[in-house]
Image: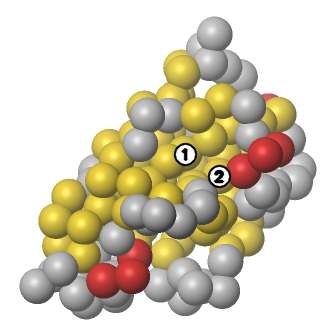
């Protein structure tokens, strides 16, 4: 059974950085694409970034392009989201999710079947 656990969230000042981790178990890591999603209070869950199972394909929402970087270490069964130049509008609960996709990825929440429990990120002075 695939399980995902996010960590690394917290309170950070505007302009600061955080690195989120998504640790997975119960899978063959390079078969699964991973997406990172954010849900702010009163808003729909939005797809921020994704990475294919092979790691060769990534994409980003325009709102985070150039500031966030997604990477994966399949030997450690972990996917990371490095977040730099954080803004107050980046505040929300961050989720990672998985779907079987080795050479492709998508940021559409409905396409993902396995989700972590989320980690809170608050950007505030």
Q: Is mark 1 on a helix, strand or loop?
A: strand
Residue picked out by circle 1: 96
Residue 100 located left or right of residue 13: right
Question: How much space separates mark 2 and mark 1, taking CA atoms?
Answer: 6 Å
Outermost residue on the front side: it is 42
Q: What element carries label 2?
A: strand
Give the position of the C terminus as an image quadrant. Answer: bottom left
Image x and y of residue 4, in percent: 51, 29
- Cβ atoms under marks 2 and 1 closer than 8 Å: yes
Tell me which residue sits at (47%, 84%) in the image.
67
Image x and y of residue 89, in percent: 39, 82
Looking at the picture, does residue 47 appear above or below residue 64?
A: above
Residue 103 appears anywhere in the view: yes
Looking at the picture, does residue 64 appear above or below residue 121?
A: below
Tell me which residue sits at (40%, 62%) in the image.
41
Q: Quadrant of residue 118?
A: top left
Which mark is drawn over residue 108?
Answer: none
Image x and y of residue 88, in percent: 30, 83
Looking at the picture, does residue 69 appear above or below residue 22?
A: below
Residue 107 located left or right of residue 74: right
Q: Residues within 10 Å of mark 2 (few under 14, many from 20)?
A: many
Tell me which residue sits at (43%, 34%) in the image.
117
Mark earlier in primary sequence (2, 1):
2
Residue picked out by circle 2: 35
Q: Which residue is more in the foreground, 40 or 79?
A: 40
Tell me which residue sits at (54%, 45%) in the image.
96
Residue 80 located left or right of residue 101: left
């Amino acid at each position: 059974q695939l399980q995902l656990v996010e960590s690394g969230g917290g309170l950070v000042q505007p302009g600061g950085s955080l690195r989120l981790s998504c640790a997975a178990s119960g899978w063959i890591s390079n078969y699964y694409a991973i997406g990172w999603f954010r849900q702010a209070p009163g808003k729909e869950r939005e797809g921020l970034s994704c990475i294919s199972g092979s790691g060769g394909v990534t994409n980003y929402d325009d709102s985070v392009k150039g500031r966030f970087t997604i990477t994966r270490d399949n030997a450690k069964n972990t996917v990371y989201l490095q977040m730099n130049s954080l803004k107050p509008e980046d505040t929300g609960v961050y989720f990672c999710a998985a779907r079987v996709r080795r050479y492709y990825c998508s940021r559409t929440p409905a396409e993902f079947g396995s989700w972590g429990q989320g980690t809170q990120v608050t950007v505030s002075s």
